[in-house]
Amino acid sequence: MRIVCVGGGPAGLYFAILAKRRYPQHEVTLSERNPAGATYGWGVVFWDDFLDGLYRNDPDSAREIRESAVLWEGQEVRMRGERTAYLGGYGFSMSRRGLLEILTRRARALGVDVQFEREIGDPAGLDADLIVACDGVNSGIRERHAEHFGAGVAVGRNKYIWLGTPKVFDSFVFGFEQTPAGWIWFHAYPSTTENSTCIVECTPETWSGLGLDELDPDKGTQVLEEIFAGPLDGHPLINQTRSMGVVPWLNFREISNRTWRRDNVVLMGDAAHTTHFTIGSGTKLAVQDAIGLADVLPLHAEDLPRALQNYDEQRRAALLAVQDAAHSSMTWFEHVDVHIDPHRDPDAVEFAYSLWKRRGHYPFWRYQLHLATQIGPLRRARSSVSSARRTLRARRRGELPVLHP
Ligand SMILES: Cc1cc2nc3c(=O)[nH]c(=O)nc-3n(C[C@H](O)[C@H](O)[C@H](O)COP(=O)(O)OP(=O)(O)OC[C@H]3O[C@@H](n4cnc5c(N)ncnc54)[C@H](O)[C@@H]3O)c2cc1C
């Protein structure tokens, strides 16, 4: 069978790896329009469930990804640089570029023909039994057949910008600052052991009130550096990614499709669906799509239509709950002002709890746990429990201890 993946993000690369790994006789080509090593964005976060899936499906790349990832412990909500509230938990993060490099190397080692600087226009011209449209949020293939796919795009209200900083955070930090134009905040976490990701977000009113709509990118970044000088300890913000130029302010695009298949073409990853970045799941879901399609991939092209139908039905159903959670999270951040009483000093602990439960409802004991987490010794006890759980889970998936210098 001849398979062509259009787009060299996590979805396309991981599917190419699995297709070649399970069916070495299939011919698998992946075309990416950008040069090797050029990509948007800084770091991505993920959790144990992502690593579990990677270890189950391709332990070689899983090991490399884990070794390149940074562990962060706990989440902090900082308000005006004065008050900090703590949330528990831990997660992992790594640079998007590093992730793509590992997946590209692995795909090539398995015999995938990875072609950079090859942009695919009309997929009809491709000689393939299966075409995987994994060409991202602005998918040209989806747009070409938007009516057939039942494509829907809802544009988020808030403005955001995906920046980097040499300040290395060791936990996931939400930093909220109050300006004369309203609240503005960042979501920060380590990307590597040398730098962090810092996504800045605000309402459109605050954005224009601060003049960010009219400032050139460097001046705009200076304004953000001044606002966040405290939590960034005076470190700069970086608004460039290597080879991809200056980063723009964007509005989130929430993508949905009524169907993910058209003849021998299937949508995958962000081309099929997006989930708001405040739940940090897009990469995991893209990889889960890849696993889902590989799981139903038949040996022969004649069985393909049924396989694609299964993929379409199963993955769309699996996504419903997480899409709901992502939408709730996006909406919570679009109404930050509502969660802060303008007539009182902000209560960081209450605010942090509201932030924590933005994705849904939690049992009453969660709130008690949250209050307990604000007390140093109890926080450390909670962290020890998390750490023991993490070690157990890592052992279960066959992970060796990761030694960072
Ligand atoms: C601000 C922000 C923060 C995020 N943080 C996280 C996070 O912490 N954790 C997480 O899990 N997810 C995160 N995400 C989501 C994540 O980045 C995406 O969900 C993920 O990259 C989707 O993978 P993909 O392969 O579907 O698409 P992409 O990674 O976008 O890859 C698509 C590729 O297709 C290529 N392409 C497009 N058109 C063509 C064409 N015609 N021909 C050839 N190539 C083409 C593009 O150049 C691109 O390389 C974040 C997203 C945003 C916006």
Image: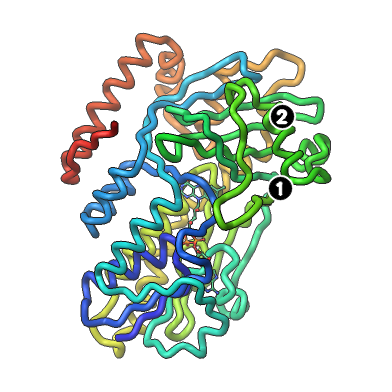
Quadrant in the rendering for residue 128: bottom left
Circle number at residue 183: 2
Residue at 34% x, 56% y is 102
Residue behind mark 1: 157
Is 399 rendered above or below residue 304? above
In the image, 191 versus 284, the foreground residue is: 191
User: Would residue 273 appear left or right of 246 to someone viewing this image?
Assistant: left
Image quarter hosting the N terminus: bottom left
Mark 2 and mark 1 in contact (Cβ < 8 Å)?
A: no
Residue at 51% x, 89% y is 124
Q: For label 2, count other residues whose C-alpha is less than 10 Å away and answer few (under 14), some (14-19) or many (20+).
A: many
Is 142 rendered above or below residue 404? below
User: Would residue 234 appear left or right of 52 to someone viewing this image?
Assistant: right
| Residue 321 in view (yes/no) | no
Q: Is mark 1 within 8 Å of ligand 1?
A: no
Q: For label 1, count other residues whose C-alpha is less than 10 Å away and answer few (under 14), some (14-19) or many (20+).
A: some
Q: Secondary structure at mark 1?
A: strand
User: Would residue 179 appear left or right of 277 to someone viewing this image?
Assistant: right
Q: Earlier in the sequence, mark 1 or mark 2?
A: 1
The amino acid type found where label 1 is placed reads Arg
Residue 235 placement (x, y as % from top left): 59, 28
Residue 240 placement (x, y as % from top left): 61, 48
Image quarter hosting the C terminus: top left
Q: CA distance from mark 1 to mark 2?
A: 15 Å
Quadrant in the rendering for residue 287: bottom left
Select label 1 or label 2 by which is in front. Answer: 2
